[in-house]
């Protein structure tokens, strides 16, 4: 049994780390608009993604307990993030600091998350990006997301949206047959 999860806005609350509420972002492209453009958004990311800042923003409630429970039940956990590769050590340090059980971390802005899941026989992907979870559902994966304003429309495409990690845990257990 294998599971793939995103990091930013799935495990780690990226927007609150930037001082932005998830309720403020109405559609996926809204964040760059809010911050003055792509360049400014990338600069904002650069400030919050290093471990020294990220550690001040613990994982979403229920995330670590859910992943520990799944790991104890034999689930292989792959963390796949579109972060720049220079942030790999920051992600590793965050995962270690919060005792998040993962078997594999892929950190690359170029990684195709859905194809990676297919190549590794991973049947479940949890991600917040609406395009990625829609693509995952279209490819036959069980696609899940924490439900935010910017990704709600993905539910129309066979993606399951969960209000929090506690409800996501129930969905993942069911999908994994646990």
Image (cartoon, rainbow, N blue to C red):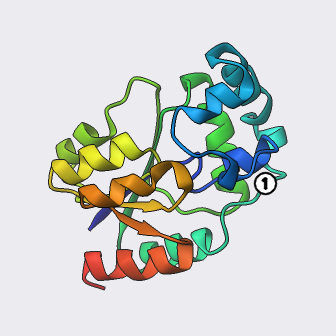
Residue 96 seen by the camera: yes
Residue where numbered disc 1 is placed: 57
Residue 54 seen by the camera: no
The residue lying toward the viewer, choosing from 12 and 159, is: 159
The residue lying toward the viewer, choosing from 112 and 70, is: 112
Q: Is residue 122 left or right of residue 73?
A: left
Report the residue at 52% width, 42% height from top: 27
User: Where does the C terminus fall, quadrant-wise?
Assistant: bottom left
The residue lying toward the viewer, choosing from 77 and 174, is: 174
Establish if 103 lies above or below 19. below
Report the residue at 25% width, 43% height from top: 135
Find residue 139 and report its horizontal and vertical position in percent: 16, 48
Which of the 4 image quarters holds residue 43? top right
Q: Is residue 60 left or right of residue 58?
A: left
Which of the 4 image quarters holds residue 111? top left
Number of numbered discs: 1
Which of the 4 image quarters holds residue 158? bottom left
Q: Residue furthest top?
A: 39
Establish if 17 lies above or below 152. above
Find residue 78 and report its horizontal and vertical position in percent: 40, 52
User: Where does the N terminus fall, quadrant-wise?
Assistant: bottom left
Which structural element holds mark 1? loop
Report the residue at 27% width, 40% height from top: 116
């Amino acid at each position: 049994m294998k599971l793939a999860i995103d990091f930013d806005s799935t495990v780690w609350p990226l927007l609150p780390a930037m001082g932005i509420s998830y309720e403020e972002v109405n559609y996926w492209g809204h964040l760059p608009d809010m911050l003055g453009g792509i360049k400014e958004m990338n600069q904002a990311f650069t400030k919050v993604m290093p471990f020294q800042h990220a550690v001040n923003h613990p994982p979403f409630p229920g995330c670590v307990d859910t992943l520990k429970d799944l790991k104890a039940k034999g689930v292989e956990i792959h963390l796949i993030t579109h972060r720049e590769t220079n942030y790999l050590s920051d992600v590793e340090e965050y995962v270690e600091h919060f005792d998040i059980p993962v078997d594999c971390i892929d950190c690359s802005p170029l990684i195709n998350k859905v194809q990676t899941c297919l190549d590794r026989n991973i049947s479940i992907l949890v991600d917040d990006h609406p395009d990625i979870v829609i693509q995952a559902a279209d490819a036959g994966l069980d696609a899940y997301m924490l439900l935010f304003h910017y990704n709600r429309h993905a539910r129309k495409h066979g993606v399951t949206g969960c209000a929090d990690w506690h409800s996501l845990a129930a969905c993942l257990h069911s999908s994994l047959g646990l």
